[in-house]
């Protein structure tokens, strides 16, 4: 049973240094905040998406996920893939792959998000473990775990949901 709600950082959480934030200070349920830093998604030399108008979704114990406006994504390079999943907070997700590799989903969108996340309707989130993602020039590391899409940068500290031994979070 989940009982960690960012009301008090747990003893095992790392202490953030100057210019850092702890994922244990993020709220549950999650929130979306505008982020004006340059966010880019690349496949080698090919720019898939680039914006300075993303939303950063933050939830207790998870690295944030950046959502990019659809007009800043080169959709001609992507194809919809079969299947979907449900997020208890955001709703039903649809998946996207590179047209050159249609069997590997690299992104997801919410065509009909729940009301509290209407601001990310049709915005694209990308898996940094499957495609190169950058925030303000920093290459993003993927959140541990096969399903998660959090973006690990030097500005955040954990431990993060998805690491070994975190299944009960």
Image (tube, rainbow, N blue to C red):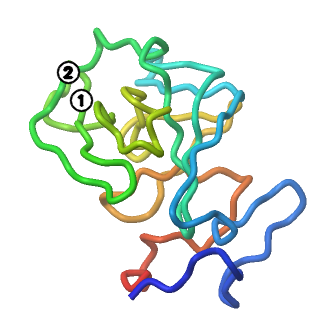
Is residue 108 visible to us here?
no
Q: Give the left or right position of residue 158, taking residue 19 as reference.
A: left
Q: Quadrant of residue 122?
A: top left
State which quarter of the image contains the C terminus. Answer: bottom left
Q: Give the left or right position of residue 56, taking residue 71 as reference.
A: right
Of the pair 122 and 101, the residue shown nearer to us: 122
Spatial separation of the CA atoms under disc 1 and disc 2: 5 Å
Query: Farthest residue in the left direction?
Result: 82
Q: Give the left or right position of residue 52, taking residue 92 as reference.
A: right
Of the pair 87 and 73, the residue shown nearer to us: 87
**Residue plotted at (45% across, 12% down):** 71
Of the pair 33 and 22, the residue shown nearer to us: 33
State which quarter of the image contains the N terminus. Answer: bottom left
- State if disc 2 and disc 1 touch (CB < 8 Å): yes
Q: Quadrant of residue 34?
A: top right
Query: Farthest residue in the right direction?
Result: 18
Mark 2 secondary-structure assignment: strand
Mark 1 highlights which residue? 97
Mark 1 or mark 2: name the one nearer the start of the chain: 2
**Residue plotted at (64% across, 41% down):** 33
Q: Which mark is residue 79?
A: 2
């Amino acid at each position: 049973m989940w009982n960690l709600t960012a009301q008090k950082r747990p003893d095992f959480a790392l202490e953030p240094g100057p210019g850092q934030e702890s994922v244990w200070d993020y709220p549950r349920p999650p929130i979306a905040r505008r982020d004006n830093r340059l966010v880019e998604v690349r496949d080698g030399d090919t720019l898939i998406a680039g914006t300075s108008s993303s939303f950063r979704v933050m939830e207790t114990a998870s690295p944030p996920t950046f959502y990019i406006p659809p007009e800043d994504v080169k959709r001609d390079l992507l194809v919809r893939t079969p299947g979907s999943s449900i997020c208890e907070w955001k709703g039903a997700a649809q998946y996207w792959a590179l047209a050159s590799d249609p069997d590997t989903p690299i992104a997801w969108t919410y065509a009909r998000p729940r009301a509290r996340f209407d601001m990310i309707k049709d915005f694209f989130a990308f898996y940094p473990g499957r495609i190169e993602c950058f925030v303000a020039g920093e290459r993003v590391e993927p959140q541990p775990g096969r399903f998660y899409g959090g973006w690990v940068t030097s500005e955040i500290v954990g431990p993060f949901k998805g690491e070994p031994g975190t299944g009960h979070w």
